[in-house]
Image: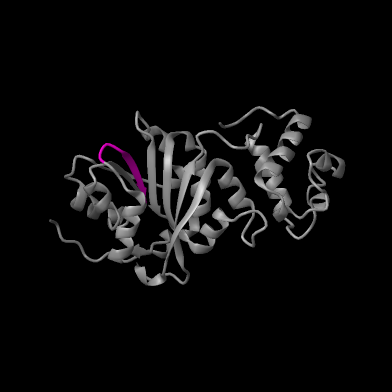
Amino acid sequence: MTQFAPHRARKRFGQNFLHDPGVIDRIHRAIAPREGQHLVEIGPGQGAITQGLLASGARLEVVELDNDLHPILLARFGHLPNFTLHKGDALKFDFASLADDQPLRVVGNLPYNISTPLMFHLLKQSAQIADMHFMLQKEVVQRLAAPVGGNHYGRLGIMVQYYCQVEHLFDVGPGAFSPAPKVDSAIVRLTPHAELPHRAENPGILEQVVREAFNQRRKTLRNTLRPLLDADSIAAEGLDPGLRPEQVDLAGFVRLANRLARHSGASATQKD
């Protein structure tokens, strides 16, 4: 095998390379890849997780932005028939284009600086995705999985929970990475709903309502949603206008969004 000089993690790519064998094994067991499945790994780095995914016999496609890592990945895995490298930016990548008769299973140790926009990019293509397993900053995972009324409950969790079941699987300390990040990490599983439990007539309007509500999260719905809905409209959907946004569950926000969509004439569904 071709020998390469050690790759130095690049701050501009948000690189922290996973090296702890115990953590890697635990991630593999959580994903449980199987022969015949179609996996996509975002940001494989030097292949710490990649190797075990390929060993399962699953078909694996990886998306890597760092040009210096491409020859390392090709030298390690390029000879394998179930490995494909895509060179490019995951934020701009058309994941749906990879879908065929097998739904995609998406995996990634995501750079903290792009994790939120990347998840929203993937959620737009969730119809082609069976599940997603991500390494993220622990605080982000807490926000994703937060229940109504919790300290971490907010826009990110509501919008991701609209599309997916969220499971906070386990935490990972800084020592599992090189260089070690300054924060704890965690593994999360996102499983797109087969049928949305609460369907918004227009998901874009749902996002608008949630964003407006949490712009000033300590204020009441009556105040935060005033540009969109008056107090009578909020009450008509079974919600007390005096509630704070963190006291309103996903179903409540969907009802408010659907009312706004009907009254604004923008109820065309953008996404199943």
Q: Is residue 201 left or right of residue 61?
A: right
165 and 59: which one is in front?
A: 165
Q: Is residue 265 left or right of residue 82?
A: right
Position above or below: 95 against 29: above
Q: Where in the figure is residue 175, as x and y percent of width and height?
A: 37, 72
Q: What is the residue that sits farthest to the left in this orientation?
A: 1
Q: Is residue 150 magenta?
A: no
The quarter of the picture where the N terminus appears is bottom left
Position above or below: 173 against 186: below
Q: Where in the figure is residue 260, as x and y percent of width and height?
A: 76, 36
Position above or below: 97 against 46: above
179 and 241: which one is in front?
A: 241
Residue 85, quarter of picture: top left
The quarter of the picture where the C terminus appears is top right
Q: Where in the figure is residue 104, as x and y percent of width and height?
A: 38, 38
Q: Is residue 38 magenta?
A: yes
Please give the name of the residue rendered at 64% of the width and 54% of the height, measured from the top-left corner.
154
221 and 198: which one is in front?
A: 198
Is residue 19 visible in the rendered structure shown here?
Answer: no
Q: Where in the figure is residue 262, as x and y percent of width and height?
A: 75, 30
Q: Which residues are magenta?
A: 35-42
209 and 162: which one is in front?
A: 162
**Colouring:** one colour
Residue 129, quarter of picture: top left
Q: What is the residue that sits farthest to the right in this orientation?
A: 232
Prevailing secondary structure of the magenta residues? strand
Position above or below: 25 against 58: below
Is residue 173 visible in the rendered structure shown here?
Answer: yes
